């Protein structure tokens, strides 16, 4: 069995990776994790940023699924 990573650790790692991503402007994103399922909420500037935020989130160890509820700014 794989290592069980707690939700707080996952949330912290996702937030750090999103903040460190220089190729996008993912700044107003809330991250909540429940049993390895990460919910992303907030606004981003483009559909590319929305997809990038999900890709970054999925790359974090312990993430089982992503609920991408990000809205693209109009």
Image (spheres, rainbow, N blue to C red):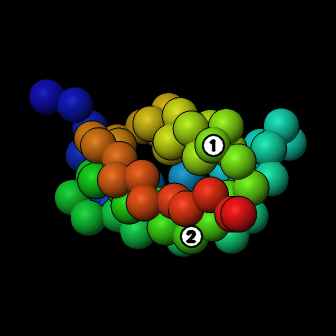
Farthest residue toward the top? 1
Give the SS element for disc 1: helix
Residue beneath the point at 28% across and 53% down:
37
Task: Answer whether residue 12 is visible to the viewer in this image.
Answer: no
**Is residue 6 shown left or right of residue 53?**
left
Callout 2 crowding tier (Cα within 10 Å): few <14, some 14–19, many ≥20: some
Q: In front: 35, or 3?
A: 35
Image quarter of the C terminus:
bottom right
Circle 1 residue: 47
**Is residue 3 shown left or right of residue 20?**
left
Q: In front: 23, or 9?
A: 23
Pointer 2 or 1: first along the chain: 2
Residue 28: image quadrant is: bottom right
- Relative image position of residue 73 (x, y in whole percent): 69, 63
- Relative image position of residue 5 (x, y in whole percent): 32, 50
Residue 42, numbered circle: 2
Q: In front: 46, or 25?
A: 46
Residue beneath the point at 34% across and 53% down:
67
In the displayed structure, 20 sits above or below 32; it is: above
Residue beneath the point at 63% across and 66% down:
43
């Amino acid at each position: 069995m794989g290592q069980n990573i707690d939700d707080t650790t996952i949330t912290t790692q996702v937030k750090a990776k999103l903040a460190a991503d220089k190729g996008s402007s993912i700044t107003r994103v809330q991250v909540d994790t429940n049993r390895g399922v990460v919910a992303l909420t907030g606004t981003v500037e483009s559909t590319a940023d929305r997809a990038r935020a999900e890709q970054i989130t999925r790359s974090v160890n312990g993430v089982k699924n992503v609920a991408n509820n990000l809205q693209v700014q109009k």
